[in-house]
Amino acid sequence: MPIEVEIVSPEKRLLSRSVEMVVMPGSEGDLAAMEEHAPMIVLLRGGLVSLYDAGRGLATPSEQFFVAGGFAEITGDRCTILADEATPLRELSRSEGEARLAEAERAYDNADKSDITTLDPYLDRLQSARAHVEAAER
Amino acid sequence: MASLKELRGRITSVKSTRKITSAMKMVAASKLRRAQARAEAARPYAEAMQRMLAALARSVIGRDGAPPLLAGTGKDQVHLLVPVTSDRGLAGGFNSNLGRATRNLARRLEGQGKTVKILPVGRKGADYLAREFGQKVIDRVPGSAGKDVAFGAANELGERIVRMFEAGEFDVCTLLFNRFNNVMSQTPTELQLIPLSLPSNDNERGEDQGATYEFEPDEETILARLLPRNLQIQIYRAMLESAAGEQGARMTAMDSATRNAGKAIDRLTLTYNRTRQANITRELIEIISGADAV
């Protein structure tokens, strides 16, 4: 019972194949998509997208990508992940993540904190950068 | 009649011009292939984004408090025009066609009493429009300078436009770019970015769109993220199309320049040979009539 997964960034399509299950980092918590999932549009936070193939069971992911945030469209037979940026986990660079984290912290410190509703973009950047570093540590 | 030496000089110079134009044509052709491949690669993202946006808009439209990026400010007094041109010339009518389209639109809007601001991308368009509109050109954004278009550039421009919009600097934003039809033809195209013009759903309604989506978190939160991103994607696509169009236009222009140079060489060679023959004939006549006189 496969589901078609596509991971696309604005510049190119990184992956398009059929897997048993895909787990993605939703903004409100991780979620998994399998065949016959209810149609859904999800906001993604920075984190790992894991692909699981039928042959290998659902214990270990067969492939993982880091996404820096984005959106996902899930339908019964397809899952399209629109990543702001996506990197295969093994190519993820820790130093880049740390640089990004430092940059995000600086931006957050300099941000105007009088109106907390405007802070979301900064917090999202921080979260994404932290997830980047964490993912690269594995 | 020009002397033989002059003619020889002109033939050599046209020949070297032909060499240059034909080299430029080859370069443009290979850059065109790259640009097309990039435009192709960017398509899946843009298409998926359109789908999501249409689904979201369907469920939000008609409600109160739709985001201004989607619904606009309710006014259309100040217009921001963003024409995308190239940094380099020698591409036939590519830049001037777009410049003219921008000028016509600006004049039409001004005729209706609107205020026009122009934010040109690419040096050629900026130069062209600055001559005519002066202060209305609020800034200029560098183009891709013939290199590959990076998403980062579109990203920055998109963020800047959103910031300007939120600061209330304009009500309507229109992107102008050369749509890439094929190598031979590019059409200047207007695309309204803010408020967003959604492709009409009429033809989609016929087939079963089926899915009504669930949203996580809610529609508004996703829209608030999706709309600025969509803006960047639209700008990115326009830049890609424009980059491909530029190379196509240059290829066509250089192809015809090469052909014209070939024709000019043929014509000059003909004149050269005729002149040479006339000279020989004249000398012969002089010799013969000299011999007759003896």
Image (cartoon, helix red, strand yellow):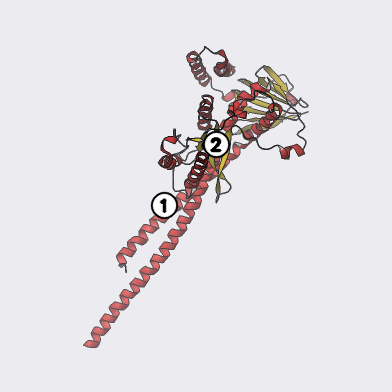
Question: In terms of secondary structure, where does tag 2 sit?
Answer: strand
* Residue B230 against residue B38 in the figure, above or below: above
Q: Nearer the viewer, residue B68 or B237?
A: B68
Q: To which chain does the residue with label 2 belong?
A: B
Residue sitting nearer the eye, A17 or A8: A8
Q: Is residue B14 visible?
A: yes
Q: Report the mark closest to the observer, 2 or 1.
A: 2
Residue B124 picture location, percent across and down: 44, 42
Dot 1: element: helix
Residue lying furthest top in this view? A114
Quarter that holds the N terminus of chain B? bottom left
Q: Chain of mark 1?
A: B
Which residue is drawn at the image coordinates 36% and 57% (left, top)?
B13
Mark with earlier residue (2, 1): 1
Q: What mark, if any, has residue B20 been given in the picture?
A: 1
Q: CA distance from mark 2 to mark 1?
A: 38 Å
Residue occupied by mark 2: B174
Query: What residue do we see at 51% from left, 21% from top?
Result: A96
Above or below residue B8? Residue B239 is above
Write down the quadrant of residue A115 in the picture: top right
Residue B60 lies, in percent from the top left, at 69, 26
Q: Position of residue B269 (x, y in %)?
A: 39, 66
Q: Is residue B149 left or right of residue A89?
A: left
